[in-house]
């Protein structure tokens, strides 16, 4: 039983929660056969942490970062009853999740700024999202940030060309008005009413 318990801890320390679950289950079965209720309860706490981490890992792998975040937080909370094993692993995963979620948040903020016409602010947010995605090797987040940047540059170019067209039209109107005034002034000077 002690061998399986020690193996459980070793597997947790090497972030191999699948094997840790197997070893913990073996240790728990032996504790039950030996009628060691204290060890059985202790192993149950370890098993709860292990299973919660496995659920979190599954959600993380599926890209459901908010659900994974909840599971990791729950596992950290439960780990205090299991000698705080695996908390480093869980905290590292939570750090990565916060970066993944910040990528989504930065893109959303960039979208909002772009809708308001703040192209520089939007570009800054998209570049931050891209940088964060690169830091955790988030291919999808990086691609989303790149797509948002491309859309931003197209919209910015379109807005600039529309502004240029409006400025050209206004300039033409002002030139036409000035020519009319000049023609009126010259007609007045020639007394050609």
Image (cartoon, rainbow, N blue to C red):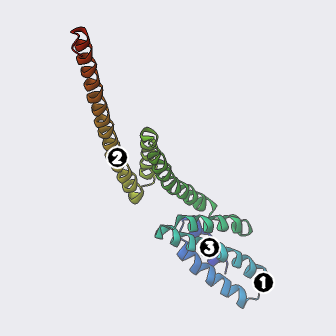
**On screen, 118 above or below 179?**
below
Q: Which residue is mark 1?
A: 37
Which residue ends up furthest to the right in the rendered image?
A: 38
The residue carrying pointer 3 sits among few (fewer than 14), some (14 to 19) or many (20 or more) residues within 10 Å by Cα, namely many
SS class, disc 1: helix
Q: Quadrant of the N terminus?
A: bottom right
Q: Nearer the viewer, residue 167 or 31?
A: 167
Question: x%, y% of residue 171?
Answer: 29, 27
Mark identifier at residue 155: 2
Alpha carbon distance from label 3 to label 2: 45 Å
Of the residues tagged 3 and 2, which is closer to the observer? Answer: 2
Q: Which residue is mark 3?
A: 52
SS class, disc 3: helix
Question: x%, y% of residue 51?
Answer: 61, 76
- Among the 4 quarters of the image, the one containing residue 73: bottom right
Of the residues tagged 3 and 1, which is closer to the observer? Answer: 3
The residue carrying pointer 2 sits among few (fewer than 14), some (14 to 19) or many (20 or more) residues within 10 Å by Cα, namely some
Q: Residue at x 59, y 64 (%)?
A: 69
**On screen, 159 above or below 58?**
above
**On screen, 4 above or below 75?**
below
Query: Which label's residue is closer to the chain start, 1 or 2?
Result: 1
Alpha carbon distance from label 1 to label 2: 67 Å
Q: Is residue 59 left or right of residue 153?
A: right
């Amino acid at each position: 039983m002690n061998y399986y318990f020690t193996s459980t801890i070793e597997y947790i320390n090497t972030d191999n929660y699948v094997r840790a679950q197997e070893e913990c289950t073996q240790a728990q079965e032996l504790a039950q056969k030996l009628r060691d209720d204290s060890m059985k309860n202790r192993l149950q706490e370890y098993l709860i942490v292990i299973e919660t981490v496995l659920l979190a890992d599954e959600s993380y792998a599926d890209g459901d970062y908010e659900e994974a975040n909840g599971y990791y937080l729950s596992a950290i909370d439960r780990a205090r009853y299991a000698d705080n094993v695996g908390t480093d692993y869980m905290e590292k995963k939570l750090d990565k999740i916060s970066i993944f979620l910040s990528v989504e948040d930065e893109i959303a903020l960039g979208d909002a700024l772009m809708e308001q016409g703040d192209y520089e602010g939007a570009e800054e947010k998209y570049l931050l999202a891209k940088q964060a995605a690169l830091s955790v090797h988030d291919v999808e987040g990086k691609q989303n940030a790149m797509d948002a940047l491309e859309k931003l540059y197209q919209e910015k170019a379109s807005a600039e060309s529309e502004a240029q067209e409006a400025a050209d039209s206004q300039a033409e109107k002002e030139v036409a008005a000035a020519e009319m005034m000049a023609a009126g002034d010259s007609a007045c000077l020639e007394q050609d009413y």
